[in-house]
């Protein structure tokens, strides 16, 4: 990507689109903040500094870069283990897990366990040509501005870096939210990644979903976080059938769908059996004691929804489950499994009935969680309250009330919608992850929900404004972020993450840069966006 300045936080790594990756020993780097340079982050660290760059002509993609210095500096990932740099640079603070060699104007940095010093003589122009071929081959839809086109190119560049090759227990190509610090494969991220990939590499979109099920337990359980060697013991929002449906809409590959169906069936059955803890017909997220991540299973780690409750019928969980049941009913019908189709249809309708009767608050005019221990509805108005729209659980009257909430500045009509909690909830608000900021995957889901109910113009306005916010931040910072300020008062890098903004203390205390589903869902917005519509 061509930029007017050197921007920090952009991730660089070798992609499975070009060859074999290495989860354990592969190199990952990011552009440095401040003076031009790179920080190698994995498998261990070193610093690389370049001369001062010109104000224009600098290029950074996910696996190569060019810096307009005097003389110019160019770098490229030769493979998973080697980064070759041509031009002046200073390498320091080199960890023992890395190896460095210099010869004339060239520097080769690599993973010590796989280091081949002969690669310093590689044909740099040929490698650069090869690395850029995939990005140049893409065919994009018409977009209204040059900034939108540049943002789309950046999104695809990010996506490329986040693809791993099959390794260990993972038998398919797989994706990660970011090559650092997350690194691993995550359940709901993978579905949102596939939704973007379907437009530019449908086979890879299929792999991204199959890879998740490579790690499925024999009882149907799917972990929330996975790598080639192991997995976590909690799950995550069930959106894999949604991802599979949207991928299948593009490919029409019934053989793939038939092979996938038993996996989807088993994972959804596990959720329904193991997360309805009180047997009331609505499911509850697992919750933990960590104040900065009370419910990692929900994906909304630090939402105020979880501050005081220890068990609750969750509006988001049950909306996801209902939609998954609805989609599985269609899959079963199309595949000729009539009994399954009836089972999933009935489950979908029953969950919808329970959402509408138990989780709608007429007083608040909104869907809320229900505390099953205190037997009271939650007072927290969160973006999750819009999700009954995605599965059809809301009535037409409910949908109209929710549309009013989206435009009300005291509710969710902030400078950038949709805030993760209502604007009027000042006591719980913070510029910290799910306590206020906007998340692109929720906006994507909510727009689909309003579209389902015929609020076409409202849905398109939400998509347009979301795209503009991503584009504006990209123009200023050269990257796509994990979340964004709903008030549009401060730049994303200054937002809190898990209680503080302190990247010097931990990478988990600053909004992530070059973030996976922000990129893939921007791609989906770009390929499906309509400029007008009627409500």
Image: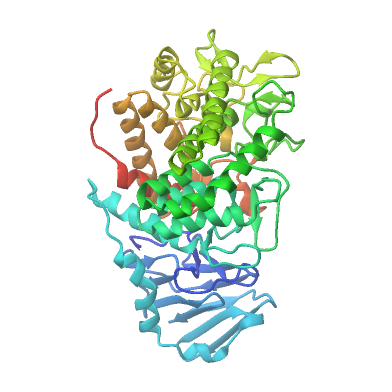
Q: Classify the position of the C terminus by image quarter.
A: top left
Which residue corresponds to the image point at 74% horizontal and 15% vertical from the top-left?
374
Residue 147, image x and y in percent? 28, 50
Considering only vertical position in the picture, is 408 above or below 120? Answer: above
**Colouring style:** rainbow
Please give the name of the residue rendered at 24% of the width and 29% of the height, measured from the top-left corner: 533
Residue in view at x 31 percent, y 43 percent? 528
Residue found at the far top of this picture: 363
The quadrant in which residue 417 appears is top left
Would residue 111 appear left or right of 373 to someone viewing this image?
left
Q: Nearer the viewer, residue 68 or 433?
A: 433
Q: Position of residue 31 (x, y in %)?
A: 49, 64
Residue 433 can be seen in this image: yes
The quadrant of the picture occupied by the N terminus is: bottom left
* Nearest to the observer: residue 156 or residue 175: 175
Q: Would residue 286 be seen by someone viewing this image from the given angle? A: no
Position of residue 375 measured from the top left corner of the image (x, y, whole percent): 72, 14
> Where is residue 455, by image quadrant?
top left
């Amino acid at each position: 990507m061509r930029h007017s300045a050197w921007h920090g936080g952009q991730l660089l790594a070798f992609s499975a689109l070009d060859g074999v990756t290495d989860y354990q020993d592969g190199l990952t780097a990011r552009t440095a903040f401040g003076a031009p340079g790179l920080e190698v982050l994995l498998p261990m660290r070193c610093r690389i500094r370049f001369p001062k760059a010109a104000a224009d002509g600098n290029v950074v993609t996910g696996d190569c870069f060019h810096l307009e210095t005097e003389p110019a500096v160019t770098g490229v990932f030769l493979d998973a283990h080697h980064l070759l740099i041509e031009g002046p640079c200073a390498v320091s603070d080199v960890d023992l897990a890395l190896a460095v060699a210099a010869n004339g104007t060239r520097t080769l940095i690599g993973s010590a366990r796989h280091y081949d010093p002969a690669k310093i003589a590689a044909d740099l122009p040929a490698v650069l040509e090869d690395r850029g071929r995939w990005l140049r081959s893409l065919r994009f839809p018409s977009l209204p501005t040059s900034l939108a086109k540049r943002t789309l190119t950046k999104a695809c560049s990010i996506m490329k870096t986040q693809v791993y090759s099959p390794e260990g227990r993972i038998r398919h190509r797989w994706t990660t939210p970011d090559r650092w610090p997350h690194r691993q494969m995550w359940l709901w991220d993978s579905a949102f990644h596939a939704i973007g990939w379907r437009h530019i590499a449908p086979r890879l979109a299929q792999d991204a979903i199959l890879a998740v099920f490579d790690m499925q337990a024999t009882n149907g359980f799917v972990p929330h976080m996975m790598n080639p060697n192991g997995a976590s013991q909690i799950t995550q929002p069930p959106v894999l059938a949604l991802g599979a449906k949207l991928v299948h809409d593009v490919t029409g590959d019934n053989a793939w769908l038939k092979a996938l169906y038993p996996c989807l069936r088993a994972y959804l059955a596990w959720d329904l059996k193991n997360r309805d803890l009180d047997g009331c017909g609505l499911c509850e997220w697992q919750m933990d004691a960590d104040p900065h991540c009370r419910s990692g299973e929900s994906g909304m780690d630090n939402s105020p929804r979880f501050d005081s409750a220890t068990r609750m019928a969750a509006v988001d969980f049950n909306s996801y489950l209902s939609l998954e049941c609805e989609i599985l009913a269609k899959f079963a019908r199309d595949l000729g499994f009539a009994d399954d189709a009836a089972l999933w249809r009935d489950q979908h309708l029953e969950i919808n009935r329970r959402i509408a009767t138990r989780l709608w608050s007429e007083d608040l005019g909104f869907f809320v969680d229900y505390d099953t221990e205190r037997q009271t509805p939650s007072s927290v108005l969160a973006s999750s309250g819009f999700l009954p729209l995605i599965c059809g659980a809301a009535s037409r009257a409910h949908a109209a009330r929710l549309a009013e909430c989206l435009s009300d500045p005291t509710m969710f009509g902030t400078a950038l919608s949709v805030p993760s909690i209502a604007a009027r909830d000042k006591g719980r608000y913070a510029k910290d992850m799910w306590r206020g900021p906007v998340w692109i995957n929720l906006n994507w889901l909510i727009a689909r929900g309003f579209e389902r109910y015929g609020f076409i113009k409202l849905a398109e306005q939400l998509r347009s404004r979301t795209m503009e916010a991503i584009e504006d931040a990209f123009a200023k910072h050269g990257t796509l972020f994990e979340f964004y300020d709903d008030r549009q008062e401060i730049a994303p890098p200054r937002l809190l993450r898990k209680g503080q903004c302190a990247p010097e203390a931990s990478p988990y205390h600053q909004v992530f840069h070059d973030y996976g589903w922000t990129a893939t869902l921007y791609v989906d917005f770009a390929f499906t966006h309509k400029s007008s519509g009627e409500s």
